[in-house]
């Protein structure tokens, strides 16, 4: 089965699927500058923490390849300014910020190395961005295999598992394969998936528009449920695990993810269903000690009051439309699934923090 490719990088040309048109229209749009990259991220034509960082970095690569730079000083200043701008497109997901920190370190080395020419610095900066895309797919497959093993081990010896997921964390949220939905893919490939339930995920409907699209593309056994159904679902159907993604995991394991994740974790706790956060280590922010420090993006009211451009809510009503909430680490009972293993939230600092921030 051909994997869905939300991001295409071919001979220095960047195109993305316009996710605002899915599932009924699959339309690729080309990104030719950092400005366009920022816009497509801000408008959520591309979304998903890893995908945001990848499109941001590749939009820089596209722009750098098109221009001549007088010297490395001008080039270094341009790269830093453009990267800082890209971080402002959406504040909650940490992947773009983490990529900026790493890429700036890499570029600074090139800048200070007298043996590196200006053109060589452009070429090697673009190469970093291309590797960043390739690494994400590789990380997702490793993460998904770790997660599949952990879910099966916790499922009391059943041969096939029934799972519930929220939002979209598949190929449309990453460079490919996905995180939480990647775990579902790995279980499906191994013949171990009984059923995957996905929530609509109002108000952007990542679940009903995007996750159902991926489930149907790969003919996985899936069912769509309203966000309000999850307690009834766990009360009446056997759910072996809840799998969600992450936009930012704080050092103590508190996790910011799509709005509705927190209440899903509370319901899972009530029914003693293991709750897993599935995210590459690029989604962890060790500079933040706890989730209360994570900035939560609020989206425009009309994304909540209208559906497909048609107004539902009464004009004049005030709205509160946070795009994310923070799930406390103690509700993440299954663990944090990463490309280097599955960890208890309390283990993250000791096992994964290479920056000795704390
Ligand atoms: C692997 S994607 C992580 C995360 O990103 C999504 O948010 P959005 O669709 O607003 O970009 C969602 O929270 C996913 O779980």
Image: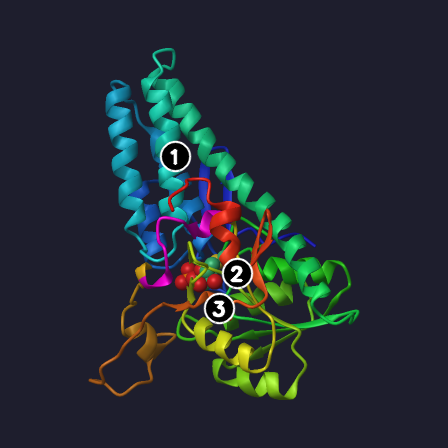
Residue of label 1: 103
Q: CA distance from mark 1 to mark 3?
A: 33 Å
Q: Is residue 259 visible?
A: yes
Between discs 2 and 1, the one toward the N terminus: 1
Q: CB under 8 Å between callouts 3 and 2?
A: no
- Helix, strand or loop status at disc 1: helix
- Helix, strand or loop status at disc 3: helix
Which stretch appears magenta?
A: 281-292
Residue of label 2: 169
Q: Is residue 20 visible?
A: no
Magenta stretch contains residue 275 = no
Where is residue 287? Give x, y as percent.
35, 48
Foreground residue among 31 and 106: 106
- Helix, strand or loop status at disc 2: loop
Residue of label 3: 330
Residue labelled 3 has its Cβ within 8 Å of some atom of ligand 1: no
Mark 2 Cα-neighbour bin, 10 Å: few <14, some 14–19, many ≥20: many
């Amino acid at each position: 089965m051909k994997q869905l490719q939300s991001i295409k990088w071919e001979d220095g040309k960047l195109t993305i699927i316009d996710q605002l048109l899915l599932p009924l229209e699959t339309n690729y749009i080309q990104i030719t500058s950092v400005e366009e990259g920022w816009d497509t991220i801000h408008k959520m034509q591309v979304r998903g923490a890893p995908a945001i960082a990848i499109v941001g970095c590749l939009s820089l690569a596209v722009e750098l390849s098109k221009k001549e730079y007088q010297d490395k000083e001008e080039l270094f200043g341009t790269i830093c300014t453009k990267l800082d701008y890209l971080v402002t497109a959406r504040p909650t997901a940490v992947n773009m910020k983490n990529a900026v920190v790493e890429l700036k370190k890499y570029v600074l080395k090139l800048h200070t190395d007298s043996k590196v020419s200006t053109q060589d610095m452009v070429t090697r900066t673009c190469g970093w961005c291309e590797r960043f895309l390739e690494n994400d797919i590789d990380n997702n497959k490793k993460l998904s295999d770790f997660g599949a093993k952990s879910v099966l081990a916790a499922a009391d010896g059943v041969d096939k598992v029934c799972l519930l997921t929220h939002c979209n964390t598949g190929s449309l949220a990453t460079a490919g394969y996905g995180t939480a939905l990647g775990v579902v893919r790995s279980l499906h490939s191994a013949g171990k998936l009984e059923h995957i339930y996905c929530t609509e995920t109002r108000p952007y409907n990542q679940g009903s528009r995007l996750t159902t699209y991926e489930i149907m593309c790969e003919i996985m056994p899936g069912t769509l449920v309203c966000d309000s159904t999850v307690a009834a679902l766990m009360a009446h159907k056997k759910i072996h695990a809840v799998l969600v993604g992450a936009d930012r995991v704080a050092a103590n394991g508190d996790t910011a993810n799509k709005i509705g994740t927190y209440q899903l974790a509370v319901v899972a706790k009530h029914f003693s269903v293991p709750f897993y956060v599935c995210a590459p280590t690029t989604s962890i922010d060790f500079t933040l000690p706890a989730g209360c420090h994570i900035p939560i993006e609020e989206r425009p009211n009309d994304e909540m009051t209208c559906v497909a451009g048609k107004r539902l809510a009464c004009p004049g009503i005030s709205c509160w439309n946070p795009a994310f909430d923070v799930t406390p680490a103690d509700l993440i009972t299954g663990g944090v699934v990463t490309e280097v293993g599955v960890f208890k939230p309390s283990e993250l600092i000791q096992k994964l923090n290479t920056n000795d921030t704390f």
